[in-house]
Image (cartoon, rainbow, N blue to C red):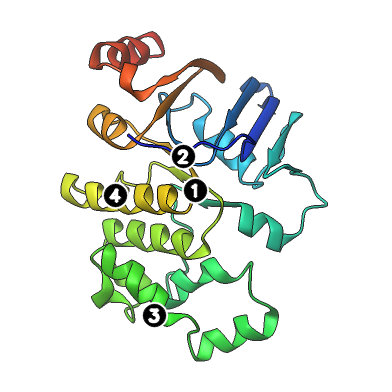
Amino acid sequence: MGEIQSSKPLLVARNVSKDYGNTRALTGITLSINAGEIVALIGPSGSGKTTLLNIIAGVIQPDIGEIELNGKLLDQSISRKVLSQSVGLINQQYSLVPNLPVIHNVLAGNLGKWGMFKAFLSLMWPQDKNSASGILSCLGIADKINERTAHLSGGEQQRVAIARTLIQAPTILLADEPVSSLDPFLAEIALKLLSATTLSNNRALIISLHSPHLIKTYCSRVIGVQHGELGFDIPASEVTDHLLEQFYETNA
């Protein structure tokens, strides 16, 4: 898997910890991600992967530690526009508006960049429709562009969520199990698009995956999370089926 490295990391996490009541979700997470890296984040359910992605995305705040995006500290002073340009999240719940057509859900990825007038105008006359249509076409659902999102299957909705984040065009793209509802053929299509977009624009992608084949095909690096701590951080070329089996058995 080819990658483009830059001297300054796009993302730095320093000693990040998070508790939910009496439950420790993350403990002392420290890592950095460079431009051109596609990083698989793996671990069993409840290991802290989603919490870590949500902290990087600015959705929740760490109790201890800090996140730096493109050299800027992620805190309450960061503007919505800067955050939108820096990081985008494809989450497991999709977070789509079911009563709106697909086109409006995709273009919601631009709301952080648009002013209020353009955002309001787009509800009546969709702006940047050609870009949205092009991404949906790559994902095989261009014919659904004017359909109500509630009428789509789970796999189609997942691809709409991917399209929304791609049109946002963040420097750091976070994807929490983005192909879990897709069959193997569609999963490959989605990951090829995410990978190509990351590498061609010198961005970074952190993606939660379980498939050894997809990890070794599309990722340059693998980070394992166990019980809220970093278990390992290795090149994807060193990942074996046996290593993954042992990792998940240990954390069962």
What's the distance in space between the residues labelled 3 and 4, CA to CA? Answer: 21 Å
Q: Nearer the viewer, residue 64 or 112?
A: 112
Visible residue check, residue 100: no
Element type at mark 3: helix
Label placed on residue 192: 4
Residue kind at label 3, given as amino acid type: Asn
What's the distance in space between the residues labelled 1 and 3, CA to CA? Answer: 23 Å
Residue kind at label 4, given as amino acid type: Lys
Considering every residue shown, the one lying at the far right of the view is: 77
Disc nearest the viewer among 1 and 4 = 1
Residue tagged 2: 4
Residue kind at label 2, given as amino acid type: Ile
Whichever of callouts 2 and 1 sits on the residue coming sooner in the sequence is 2
Cβ–Cβ under 8 Å for marks 2 and 1: yes
Whichever of callouts 1 and 4 sits on the residue coming sooner in the sequence is 4
For label 2, count other residues whose C-alpha is less than 10 Å away and answer few (under 14), some (14-19) or many (20+).
some
Element type at mark 2: loop
Disc nearest the viewer among 1 and 3 = 1
Disc nearest the viewer among 2 and 3 = 2
Q: Position of residue 37 (x, y in %)?
A: 46, 37
Residue tagged 3: 130
For this view, does 217 lie left or right of residue 174?
A: left
Whichever of callouts 2 and 4 sits on the residue coming sooner in the sequence is 2
